[in-house]
Image (tube, rainbow, N blue to C red):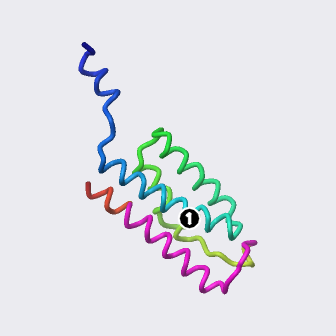
Amino acid sequence: MFPKWKCLLFKPKSKTKMKTQTKIVEALEQLLRFFDEHGANSWGARTRNAIHQIQEGNVNTKSILNDFVGAGMGSLIDLYISSDNGHSLKQSEEETNKQLQILIERVLIIHDAIKRT
């Protein structure tokens, strides 16, 4: 028989935690597609790294999402997609940034739900 601490190392994830991680990865993958489509390369790299870390289980999901929901200069909320910023636009800046806000809101909603648990 394994000592109690070793059993805890191999404890399977709960279904709720797996569903939450799936939702997070799906939301981040949508953001990643958006960033790739519009040439937001640094945010694409950060998002790709976050997805990888979540899938590998290397880091606390809350800490990963904190990188996406912080405020201030250089935060995701501060990002504005514009040809003046070197981004590719397929629609107007207004429509493109509305899409970005919807994607950001999805991440914020999931982050808030995790904080409450």
**Position of 93 compared to 98: left or right?**
right
Quick check: is 102 in the magenta stretch?
Answer: yes
Q: Residue at the spot x=54%, y=81% of the render?
A: 98
Task: Please name the residue that numbered disc 1 is placed on.
Answer: 31
Task: Locate the C terminus and report the quarter of the image it occupies.
Answer: bottom left
Which kind of residue does numbered mark 1 sit on? Leu
Q: Quadrant of residue 84?
A: bottom right
Q: Nearer the viewer, residue 111 or 13?
A: 13
Give the answer, above or below, for where 7 lies relative to 50. Answer: above
Q: Residue at the spot x=43%, y=49% of the render?
A: 63
* Magenta stretch: dominant secondary structure: helix
Give the answer, above or below, for where 79 lies relative to 70. Answer: below
Quick check: is 53 in the magenta stretch?
Answer: no
Residue 58 location (% of width, % of height): 48, 38
Task: Locate the N terminus and report the quarter of the image it occupies.
Answer: top left
Q: Nearer the viewer, residue 115 or 9?
A: 9
Q: Which residues are magenta?
A: 86-110
